[in-house]
């Protein structure tokens, strides 16, 4: 059957099970849009900005467990996707980005809206393609999805010249099979089982790879069988429910004291799907000193990249955890647990700050509810990660590796479209919300009922905190010059909202919004002096904390 290239692209999306695509049109991608108009099984969401489309596809992928799809035109449309693709790349999120390109005869001639988007995105995608031959378009589309979802997931970009979209080609209708990971080495499994059986102070560190692989239940079973103390990375939150007795809290730069101290004093760390980035480990030499580290990951490139592991096992996470569970047996860790329980719990270590109380107040309301919570990036992100009781994998949607301000609102929008039956909350700060707040237009246009909570501390709180701790309180460019009323901002898009001033009022407002089934914006003022506590001291081990944070009043004038 002969179709235009654009029609083949749409057929491939349909064959890959795509039901939602986020994008913004332009001249070079218009043949694709023309073909998409006739396909009723694929819903197109017109975002306010291409960056919003990329983040929405990312949030959609995280919430659904499938590939998120976004599209844009050539030139500025394509470059506006870059931050979103980098965000997906560093968090291993499967996204396929489709961009239009100028026609083939004008490539390299500085044509209108021409950029080398493949060259630009090469370091931040698993793979990218410029489709120069129309007959290769169908296979390339399916290959992009295969690569995005296989092994360690990640973003793939397909750049399709305008004339390739218009060319007549034969449609074959052939999908590519899924790729299976290599089987784990049984000898390394035995070494890991032996190390765990001899451990006196073991800790299981759960990373984002457990969530991505769908291995959270296997991780829980292993932890319960061996009564292992469990900590999580930011991306691993929810793989072990915050309500389980084995769970110590989040580890890392702003990790809970109990989790950090346990990792510091452990003799064996079983690290599942973690890449040991710098915010997780603190001083790397101190982190690994005197320990046996068992590193399990789908991607062998992560072994010894940041931390030397004595035992490393590559392969499918669920398979490996099941093999560890079958070969391991319980042994008494009561002395280790007695020591762990002397350290402050995740409900105790927030100093004199009031912001955590707003997050903690939501826990009784949300416990057991089927909801998702997205965050933007900044202090509010850490307050949420530290104090929201996350109950299952992918329940918290946040930007980990890139730390992208502006991620939250479009990601929450994508998550809600992926899981319309779930309540979706967004916790954002005033700084990041200003970056992509225009996506309220998209919420209003498509009636996407996301509940938005804006923590307004009249500044870039995390920058203030870093300038307080690392730059002798020489504050610069961290205090926002004027107050923005985000409830009034939302009303400009026809959306409702309210201001709250106490944790109890926030809980009541969220409960009210959950019954409305409409977008709702809630703003609360946060004291500028509030800091994220604990915080690991720069260049130190993860059990050495900065004292006195949040105790000083801050003049919000630069």
Image (spheres, grey):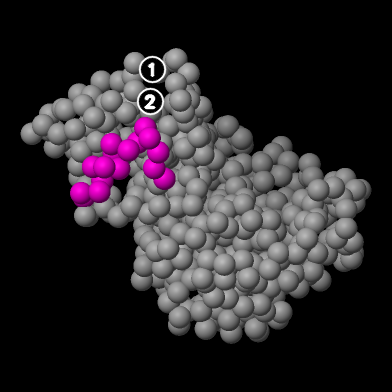
Find out whether residue 143 is within the magenta segment.
no
The x and y percentages for residue 43 are 30, 55
Asked if residue 43 is positioned above or below residue 354 in the image, the reply reads: above
Foreground pick, 125 / 38: 38
Cβ atoms at labels 1 and 2 below 8 Å apart:
yes
Q: Residue shown at 64%/67% (left/top)?
A: 486
In the picture, the disc for residue 102 is: 2
Find out whether residue 29 is within the magenta segment.
yes
The x and y percentages for residue 270 are 53, 49
Asked if residue 232 is positioned above or below residue 384 in the image, the reply reads: above
Residue 84 left/right relative to 41: right
Q: Dot 1, crowdedness within 10 Å: few (<14), some or many (≥20)?
A: few
Specify the quadrant that holds the N terminus: top left
Asked if residue 348 is positioned above or below residue 147 in the image, the reply reads: below
Residue 449 visible (yes or no): yes
The x and y percentages for residue 461 are 75, 57
Q: Which residue is mark 1?
A: 106
Mark 2, secondary structure of its residue: loop
Residue 322 visible (yes or no): no
Mark 1, secondary structure of its residue: helix
* Distance between mark 1 and mark 2 Cα atoms: 7 Å
Res 231 quadrant in image:
bottom right
Task: Please name the predominant secondary structure of the magenta segment in the image.
Answer: helix
Res 314 quadrant in image:
top left
Q: Dot 2, crowdedness within 10 Å: few (<14), some or many (≥20)?
A: many
Region rendered in magenta: 24-39
Foreground pick, 445 / 205: 445
Q: Residue shown at 21%/55% (left/top)?
A: 40
Residue 388 left/right relative to 151: right
Res 106 quadrant in image:
top left
């Amino acid at each position: 059957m002969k179709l235009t290239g654009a029609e083949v692209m749409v057929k491939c999306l349909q064959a890959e099970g795509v039901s939602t695509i986020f994008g913004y049109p332009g001249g070079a991608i218009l043949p694709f849009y023309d073909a998409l108009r006739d396909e009723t099984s694929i819903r197109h969401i017109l975002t306010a900005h291409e960056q919003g489309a990329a983040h929405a596809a990312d949030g959609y992928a995280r919430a659904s467990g499938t590939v998120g799809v976004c599209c844009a035109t050539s030139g500025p449309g394509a470059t506006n996707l870059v931050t979103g693709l980098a965000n997906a790349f560093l968090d291993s999120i499967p996204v396929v980005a489709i961009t239009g390109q100028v026609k083939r005869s004008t490539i390299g001639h500085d044509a209108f809206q021409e950029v080398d988007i493949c060259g630009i995105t090469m370091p931040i995608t698993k793979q990218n393609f410029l489709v120069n031959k129309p007959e290769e378009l169908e296979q390339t589309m399916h290959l992009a999805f295969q690569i995005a979802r296989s092994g360690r997931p990640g973003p793939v970009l397909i750049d399709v010249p305008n004339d390739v979209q218009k060319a007549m080609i034969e449609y074959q209708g052939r999908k590519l099979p899924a790729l299976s990971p290599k089987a784990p080495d049984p000898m390394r499994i035995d070494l890991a089982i032996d190390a765990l059986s001899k451990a006196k102070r073991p800790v299981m560190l759960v990373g984002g790879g457990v969530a991505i692989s769908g291995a959270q239940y296997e991780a829980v079973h292993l932890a319960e069988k061996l009564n292992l103390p469990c900590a999580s990375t930011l991306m691993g939150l929810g793989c072990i429910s915050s309500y389980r007795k084995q769970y110590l809290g989040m580890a890392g730069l702003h990790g809970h004291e109990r989790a950090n101290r346990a990792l510091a004093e452990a003799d064996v760390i079983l690290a599942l799907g973690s890449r040991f980035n710098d915010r997780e480990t603190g001083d790397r030499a101190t982190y690994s000193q005197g320990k046996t580290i068992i590193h399990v990951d789908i991607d062998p490139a992560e072994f010894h990249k940041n931390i030397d592991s004595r035992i490393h096992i590559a392969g499918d996470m669920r398979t490996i955890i099941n093999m560890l569970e079958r070969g391991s047996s319980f042994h008494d860790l009561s002395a280790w647990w007695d020591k762990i329980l002397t350290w402050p719990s995740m409900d105790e270590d927030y100093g004199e700050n009031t912001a955590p109380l707003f997050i903690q107040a939501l826990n009784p309301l949300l416990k057991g509810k089927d909801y998702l919570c997205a965050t933007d990036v900044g202090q509010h992100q850490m307050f949420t990660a530290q104090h929201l009781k996350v109950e299952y994998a992918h329940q918290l949607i946040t930007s980990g590796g890139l730390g992208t301000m502006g991620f939250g609102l479009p990601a929450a929008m994508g998550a809600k479209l992926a899981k319309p039956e779930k309540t979706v909350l967004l916790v954002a700060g005033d700084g990041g919300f200003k970056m992509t707040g225009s996506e309220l237009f998209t919420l209003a246009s498509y009636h996407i009922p996301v509940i938005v909570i804006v923590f307004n501390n009249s500044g870039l709180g995390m920058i203030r905190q870093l300038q307080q701790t690392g730059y002798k309180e020489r504050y610069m460019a961290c205090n926002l010059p004027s107050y923005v009323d985000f409830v009034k901002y939302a009303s400009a898009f026809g959306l409702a909202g309210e201001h709250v001033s106490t944790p109890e009022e926030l809980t009541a407002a969220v409960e009210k919004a959950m019954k409305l089934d409409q977008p709702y914006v809630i703003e609360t003022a946060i004291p500028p002096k509030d800091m994220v506590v604990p915080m690991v001291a720069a260049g130190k081990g993860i059990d050495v904390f900065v004292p006195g944070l949040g105790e000083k009043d801050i003049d919000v004038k630069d």
